[in-house]
């Protein structure tokens, strides 16, 4: 094979690997977001007065193993206004379940 074809195939593989990892990260963030929303719904945290502590979803510097995306998903949802945070560090749902499209249940075949 000529050098041009090898370089072209290498670049295609590199771009494909980059796109695949981005999809993988988005898939993990979606699952982490679902876990957090399901936890808030289960505990009934729908306003400031019923806000709950989500310390198990926060960053842990001693975490060993694969990356945990719950802390990043929690930060994203707070910045987007889906989840509210109280002054005491508790969290609650700001967007009603009906407006989000119903209950947060796992779809068939999703993580």
Image: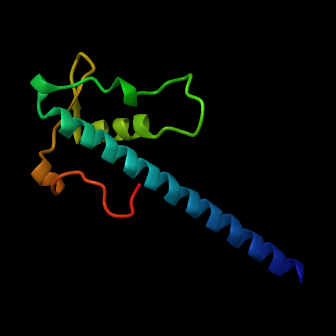
> Residue placed farthest to the front in the image?
108
Q: Which residue is drawn at 27% across and 23% down?
A: 53
Residue at left 16%, top 57%? 101
Q: In which quarter of the image is residue 11?
A: bottom right
Q: x, y percentage for residue 34?
A: 31, 47
Furthest-top residue in this view: 88
Q: Which colour scheme is used?
A: rainbow
Q: On the picture, is 71 further left or further right than 39?
A: right
Choose top left, top right, bottom left or bottom right for residue 75: top left
Above or below residue 9? Residue 104 is above
Residue 69 horizontal/vertical position (percent): 46, 40
Q: Which residue lies furthest to the bottom in this view?
A: 1
Q: Is residue 58 left or right of residue 51?
A: right
Residue 31: image location, x then y, percent: 38, 49
Using the rendered view, name the quadrant where residue 111 is placed.
bottom left
Q: Which of 33 and 103 is in front in this view?
A: 103
* Quadrant (top left, top right, bottom left, bottom right) of the N terminus: bottom right
Instruction: Tell me which residue sits at (39%, 44%) in the image.
Output: 32
Q: How many labels does the image show?
A: 0
Residue closer to the observer: 3 or 50: 50
Q: Is residue 87 left or right of residue 55?
A: left
Vertical placement of 75 versus 86: above or below? below
**50 sits left or right of 14 in the view:** left
Q: Please report the residue visible at 41 percent of the width from the left and 34 percent of the height from the top.
A: 71
The x, y position of residue 49, in whole percent, is 10, 23
């Amino acid at each position: 094979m000529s050098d041009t074809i090898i370089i072209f195939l290498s670049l295609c593989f590199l771009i494909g690997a980059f796109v695949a990892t981005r999809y993988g990260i988005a898939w993990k963030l979606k699952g982490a977001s679902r876990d957090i929303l399901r936890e808030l719904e289960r505990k009934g945290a729908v306003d400031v007065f019923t806000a709950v502590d989500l310390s198990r979803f926060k960053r842990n510097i001693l975490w060993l193993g694969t990356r945990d995306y719950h802390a990043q998903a929690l930060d994203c949802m707070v910045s987007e206004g889906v989840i509210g945070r109280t002054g005491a560090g508790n969290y609650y749902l700001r967007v009603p379940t009906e407006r989000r499209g119903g209950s947060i249940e796992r779809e068939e075949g999703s993580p």
